């Protein structure tokens, strides 16, 4: 595989709201079960990968909403965050074989994105109780399920950044 082919493949998976809605409609017509999750995914690590693998196993298609740079800054993770810009974070996620689409969103929470695609399964990490997951009511009202997946102990971007700072 040439570098050009790899870039084309991953870039095709990075879509806007209009195109992710179109893709989800096509997948749904084929009978595919759509899983949605979201996050910053600032420095991709083992915890992210295991989480995404489990999320992907819950359906046929995995769609990831990635917080824009401005959205990450508003979350108060620190003045230096995100460390990687939104396009870089989207490109890394889109390169994963188990990811079908990546959408960058600018809001603080992905409610509009969830309302637009209405996934069959809405997934967040175990640090989110199901009653706090944004869009849970939308998904359940449409017959879907909401899952809070166990986090992988010892892996978080914040902890990794602190470890790097300490040397």
Image (cartoon, rainbow, N blue to C red):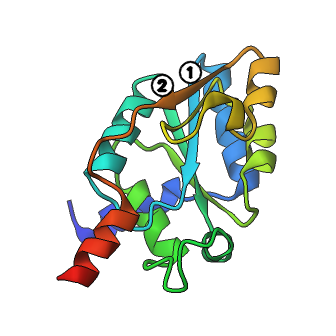
Secondary structure beneath label 2: loop
Residue at position x 81%, y 48% in the image: 112
Residue shown at 26% from the left, 50% from the top: 154
- Compared with 143, 157 (above or below) is below
Q: Quadrant of the N terminus?
A: bottom left
Mark 1 and mark 2 lie on one chain; the one further toward the N terminus is 1
Q: Nearer the viewer, residue 86 or 27?
A: 86
Within 10 Å of disc 2 (Cα), the crowding (few <14, some 14-19, many 20+) is some
The spot of residue 63 in percent (x, y) is 55, 42
Quadrant location of residue 137? top right
- Toward the left, the furthest residue is 167
The relative height of residue 156 versus residue 30 in the rendered view (above or below) is: below
Residue at label 2?
A: 60
**Which residue is disc 1 drawn over?**
32
> Viewed as shown, does residue 90 lie left or right of 118?
left
Q: What distance separates the C-alpha of mark 1 from that of mark 2?
A: 5 Å
Q: Nearer the viewer, residue 28 or 42?
A: 42
Tell me if residue 156 comes above or below residue 125 in the rendering. below
Name the residue located 60 percent from the left edge and 33 percent from the top edge: 129
Q: Are marks 1 and 2 in contact (CB under 8 Å)?
A: yes
Q: Indicate the secondary structure of the residue bearing disc 1.
A: loop
Q: Looking at the image, which residue sits at the far front?
A: 166
Q: In the figure, is residue 153 to the left or right of 40?
A: left
Count of number-bearing discs: 2
- Give the camera-side residue of 135 and 63: 135
Up the image or down, 57 lies above or below 160; here it is above
Query: For the residue carrying disc 1, how many other residues have a C-alpha within 10 Å: few (<14), some (14-19), or many (20+)?
Result: some
Q: Quadrant of the C terminus?
A: bottom left
């Amino acid at each position: 595989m040439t570098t050009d082919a790899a870039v084309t493949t991953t870039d095709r998976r990075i879509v806007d709201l209009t195109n992710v809605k179109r893709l989800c409609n096509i997948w749904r017509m084929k009978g595919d079960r759509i899983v949605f999750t979201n996050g910053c995914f600032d420095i991709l690590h083992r915890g992210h990968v295991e989480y995404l693998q489990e999320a992907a196993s819950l359906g046929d298609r995995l769609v990831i909403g990635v917080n824009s740079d401005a959205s990450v800054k508003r979350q108060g993770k620190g003045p230096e965050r995100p460390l990687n810009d939104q396009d870089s974070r989207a490109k890394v996620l889109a390169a994963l074989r188990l990811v079908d689409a990546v959408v960058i969103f600018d809001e603080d929470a992905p409610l509009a994105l969830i309302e637009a695609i209405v996934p069959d399964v809405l997934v967040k990490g175990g640090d989110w109780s199901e009653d706090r997951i944004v869009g849970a009511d939308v998904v359940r009202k449409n017959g879907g399920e909401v899952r809070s997946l166990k986090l992988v102990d010892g892996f978080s971007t914040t902890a990794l950044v602190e470890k790097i700072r300490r040397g």
